[in-house]
Amino acid sequence: MERGLKISYQSQIPNTLTSVRFIAAPIFFYTFLNDLFVASVFLLVLSLITDAFDGHVARKLNVTSDMGAYLDVAADFILILACFLAFIILGWYDPLILLLIIAMFLLFVGTSGLKKPVYDPIGKYLGGYLMIMVFISLLFPESLIRKILLIVLVIMCLISIISRFSVFYYRNNH
């Protein structure tokens, strides 16, 4: 009985770390829009730490799961959406960036749910880039830096789309 309880408890640790990002998203939105800069940066750093460790902890405890992996991606997505929505409200980014982020997330989910998921080396790092983009936008809120970050994002998205569809096309035609 004690061993079963230990395994159950251990399996919840990575999901608890992931859940921090779900909670941080609306709090970041509030703190950022209310000029609580230090709190916003703290929440983002905490989120980046939990994002770095949840998968590592799951692998170390041997409690990885498909549900945990999707929960991780969903937490990143919600946090990124909250951050960019706050940025849009302040006029830092064009609202169309949300459509791009949502489209890339749906593409990831759609191609990951296949019998044999479509590996995309660029798309794999897209979520990480978006988190870094949020962090850099916070620390260096100059318009030129945000424009450069946006150009890099668009290029990464285009390469990711081409990569995913190329792999998908190649698999279905060979």
Image: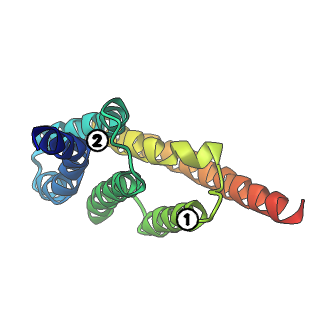
- Closest to the observer, 139 or 173: 173
* Quadrant showing the N terminus: top left
- Give 150 or 110, whichever is nearer the viewer: 110
Residue sticking out furthest to the front: 1
Q: Quadrant of the C terminus?
A: bottom right
Left or right, 108 with reference to 135: right
| Residue at image coords 60%, 63% | 111
Task: Tell me, yes or no, if residue 70 can be seen here.
Answer: yes
Q: Residue 129 vs residue 155: left or right?
A: left
Residue 56, position as x, y percentages in the image: 35, 32
**Residue at the spot of label 1:** 113
Q: Residue furthest right?
A: 174
Q: What is the residue that sits farthest to the top in this orientation?
A: 60
Q: Secondary structure at mark 2?
A: helix
Whether 104 is drawn above or below 1: the answer is below
Residue linked to disc 2: 138
Residue nearer the viewer, 143 or 107 = 107
- Give how far apart the Cα atoms at labels 1 and 2 are: 33 Å
In the image, residue 13 sits, relative to residue 158, either above or below, namely above
* Residue 141 in sight here: no
Could you tell which of marks 1 and 2 lies nearer the N-terminus? 1
Residue 58's x, y, as percent?
Answer: 33, 38
**Residue 123 badge:** none
Of labels 1 and 2, the one closer to you: 1
Q: Quadrant of residue 167?
A: bottom right
The amino acid beneath tag 2 is Leu
Residue located 36% across and 39% down the image? 55
